[in-house]
Amino acid sequence: MPLLYDLAKLTVGTTLRWGWRPRVEGLEHLPRHGGAILAGNHLSVADELFLASVTPRHVAFWAKAEYFAGHGPRGWLSRRIVGGMGAIRVERAGGRAVLSAFDAAVPVLRAGGLVAVYPEGTRSPDGRLYRGRTGMTRLAHDAGVPIVPVGVLGTAEVLPVDARLPRRHPVTLRFGPPIAVAGRIDGPRDIRTVTDEVMAAIQRLTGQEYVPRYAPRRGSPSA
């Protein structure tokens, strides 16, 4: 586990655990060893913080490429922080650049690490659960690891969009049984089937209303 990640868990993580006392259910479903993808619903930027604070193992999160390429003192600090946290660089230029994040995640998973993925692709604009993107399943197939569904509740109230300070509100995190991917993929239809299975498992954990279409990204005309 990266040293900076340890420090953040000791400081920020302890603050979250004692200040909000999140309720955690199903942690026994998290593999003690070996690689796995943690696939969760996405309500707030606080999702990552609470997930990391309650998970006993190191979790690698995505971080946009700008955090790795800044200039000057602030850029240096940013690179040191995200690198020290073991974050995975995500290019947002599209095409092959996007796939580089998955290429970087495969060796982490094959080495026995945990990688957190939010298959909706963006934060839910209205608290509902939207259709999952298939990259999660492709990644699990390529790395040969299972997918652990994770349901998070309450984080949208703790840190709403554009809020400056966190608020007190109950938070619950639920881990579901791992979903095996190995031996189940023989084409695009199988990838979609497994992806929908994972989203159904997340919905059972959260009780959210499901929307069978992709979530609009913030700033888009339909957002």
Image (cartoon, rainbow, N blue to C red):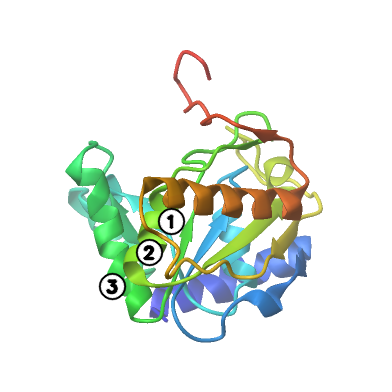
Which label sits on residue 141? 2
To which residue does mark 1 refer? 137
Label 1 crowd bin: few (<14), some (14–19), many (20+), radius 10 Å: many
Q: Which mark is residue 107?
A: 3
Identify the secondary structure beneath mark 2.
Answer: helix
44 and 148: which is toward the camera: 148
Tell me the element at label 1.
Answer: helix
Labels 2 & 1 near each other (Cβ < 8 A) = yes
Quote the CA–CA distance across marks 1 and 3. Answer: 16 Å
Q: x and y percent of residue 96 in the render?
A: 18, 44
Q: Is residue 165 left or right of residue 137?
A: right
Front tag of 1 and 3: 1
Q: Residue at x 71, y 68 (%)?
A: 17
User: Amino acid under label 1?
Assistant: Thr
Q: How crowded is the residue under tag 2: few (<14 C-alpha within 10 Å), some, or many (20+)? A: many
Residue at (37% x, 56% y) in the render? 138
Quarter containing the N terminus? bottom left
Question: Where residue 51 sits in the image (x, y, percent)?
Answer: 60, 63
What amino acid is labelled 3 in the image? Pro
Label 3 Cα crowd, 10 Å radius (few <14 / some 14-19 / many 20+) = some
User: Which callout, 1 or 3, points at the residue further toward the start of the chain?
Assistant: 3
N-term-proximal mark, 2 vs 3: 3
Asked if residue 124 shows in the view, the reply is: yes
Nearer to us: label 2 or label 3: 2
**Spot occupied by residue 126 in the image (x, y as percentages of width and height):** 67, 29
Residue occupying the far front of the picture: 186
Q: Depth check: give the residue in front, 177 or 88.
A: 177
> What is the x, y in percent for residue 37?
48, 65
Residue at 33% across / 73% down in the picture? 108
Query: Considering only vertical position in the picture, is 87 above or below 214?
Result: below
* 69 vs 182: above or below: above
Amino acid residing under circle 2: His
